[in-house]
Amino acid sequence: MEAARRRGSGLLIREVDGEILVLDSIADQIHQLNESASMIWRLYAAGTDVPEIVETLASKFDVDKDVVERDVATALARFRELNLVRDAETVQDGTERQQGGVEGT
């Protein structure tokens, strides 16, 4: 089963001119995601798997998939590091257990 994606606690998400602003009331920080990071956020939040995110961005920006794969992994790791996203792993009994990933806007 695929892990559910959840937004971190205390976040307010806004979109301004096609870019996502994440207001983190717990860390008292504002994160402005550029165009590609905003696309990664939206796609991941919508449940798109990483290979499909890579394919979408590689096609849109006409960039080699290996480069995009590294960039997507880096962006998702940074989102987790900043506690902007968490993954909830669904265990066999159907309950969820928190892990570190993104929930929608």
Image: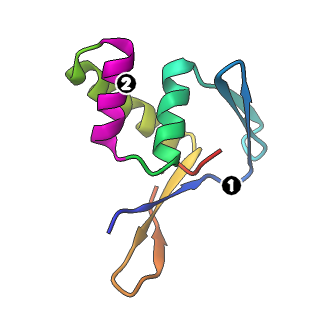
Image-based side of 61 in relation to 6, left or right:
left
Residue 66 to residue 46: above or below:
above
Q: In which quarter of the view is residue 93 placed?
A: bottom left
Where is residue 11 drawn, in percent x and y?
72, 46
Mark 2: few/some/many CA within 10 Å (<14, 14-19, 20+) = many
Q: Which residue is mark 2?
A: 57
Cβ atoms under marks 2 and 1 closer than 8 Å: no
| Mark 1 secondary-structure assignment | loop
Q: Residue at x 68, y 55 (%)?
A: 9
Query: Quadrant location of the N terminus?
Result: bottom left
Please, what is the three-letter code of the amino acid marked with disc 1? Answer: Ser
Magenta-colored segment: predominant secondary structure: helix
For this orientation, the residue located farthest to the bottom is 93
Q: Which residue is mark 1?
A: 9
Q: Residue at x 57, y 40 (%)?
A: 82
| Mark 2 secondary-structure assignment | helix
Mark 1: few/some/many CA within 10 Å (<14, 14-19, 20+) = few
Residue 50 to residue 99: above or below:
above
Q: Residue at x 40, y 62 (%)?
A: 3
Residue 75 to residue 87: above or below:
above
The range drawn in magenta is 49-62
Instruction: Identify the disc placed on residue 88.
Output: none
- Comparing 25 with 70, the one in front is 70
Please, what is the three-letter code of the amino acid marked with disc 2? Answer: Leu
